[in-house]
Image (cartoon, rainbow, N blue to C red):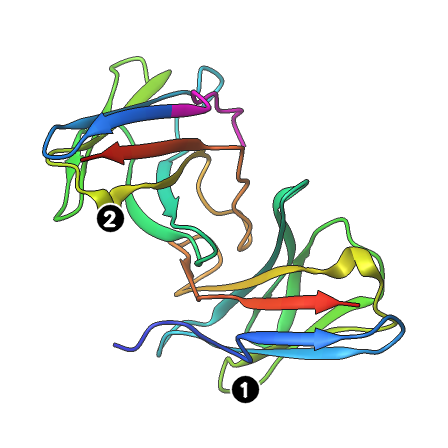
């Protein structure tokens, strides 16, 4: 799996967009970028994944740069319930294994 | 579809005992993975089962073992518990070993 780099923490005001960056400069051409989040002491929740095109679902949007060396997860209208640790994983699942880094602690403020 | 379920949700054991945790995957999912999460080490992969066969294993001692049944339900066992085994144990399931994994709520194990 490619190594990922995420900021340790970020803040966001409620109602504003939260943009969470992730660097994965060593990602291979066939490796997906996955995003999960974990709210305190719960199991990680799958958010979204993509290969090279931008993706959007009901939770978030994923923007992957053309060179695929970085990506941004966008929560369009953050709420207090979006406060969580967000994990970016480059490489996807290999024989059931996801390699988690330290993630970004996102705190949404009223 | 119902999500991944894990039982029990909380467990307290003493050193030297053994423990069995259970995981029921999402219906139709054949891959089940197990993770250990501690404050110091983060999320660490234990092992993965697909169609009753262990196909991948993390770097954990032999005290940690698992199995998968024909209905894809899985159990993990930890023998001779140590204080350091206190952790949140997470189970995840996917349609296949390379597919998106969905996590259960976890079992919080405390070893006294």
Quadrant for the N terminus of chain A, please. top right
Measured Cα–Cα span from mark 1 to mark 2: 38 Å
Label 1–label 2 contact, CB within 8 A:
no
Disc number at residue B50? none
Question: What is the span of residues highlighted in magenta in the rendered image?
Answer: A1-9
Q: Residue furthest bottom?
A: B70
The residue that disc 1 covers is: B70
Q: Relative to the observer, which residue lies in front, B50 or B80? A: B80
Identify residue for label 2. A81
Asked if residue B76 shows in the view, the reply is no
Q: Is residue A105 above or below residue A22?
A: below
Main secondary-structure element of the magenta-colored stretch: loop
Residue at (63, 44) in percent of width and height: B39
Chain on which label 2 sits: A
Q: Check disc 1: other Cα within 10 Å, few if <14, some if 14-19, many if 20+.
A: few
Q: Position of residue A93 (x, y in %)?
A: 47, 47
Q: Chain of mark 1?
A: B
Residue B85: x %, y % from top left? 76, 60
Does A6 lie within the magenta span? yes
Secondary structure beneath dot 2 equals helix
Q: Is residue A6 visible?
A: yes
């Amino acid at each position: 799996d490619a190594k990922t780099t995420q900021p340790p923490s970020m803040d966001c005001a409620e109602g504003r967009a939260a943009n969470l960056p992730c660097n994965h400069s060593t990602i291979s051409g066939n490796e997906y970028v996955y995003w999960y989040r974990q709210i305190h002491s719960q199991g990680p929740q799958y958010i979204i994944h993509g290969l090279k095109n931008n993706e959007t679902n009901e939770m978030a949007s994923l923007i992957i740069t053309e060179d695929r060396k970085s990506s941004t997860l966008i929560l369009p209208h953050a709420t207090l319930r979006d406060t969580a640790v967000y994990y970016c994983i480059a490489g996807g699942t290999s024989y059931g294994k996801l390699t988690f880094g330290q993630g970004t602690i996102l705190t949404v403020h009223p | 579809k119902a999500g991944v379920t894990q039982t029990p949700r909380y467990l307290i054991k003493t050193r030297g005992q053994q423990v069995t945790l259970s995981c029921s995957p999402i219906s139709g999912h054949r891959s089940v993975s197990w993770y250990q999460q501690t404050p110091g080490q983060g999320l660490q992969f234990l092992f993965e089962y697909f169609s009753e066969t262990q196909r991948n294993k993390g770097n954990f001692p032999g005290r940690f073992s698992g199995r998968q049944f024909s209905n894809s339900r899985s159990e993990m066992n930890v023998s001779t518990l140590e204080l350091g085994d206190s952790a949140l144990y997470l189970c995840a399931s996917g349609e296949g070993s390379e597919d998106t994994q969905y996590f259960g709520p976890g079992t919080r194990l405390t070893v006294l």
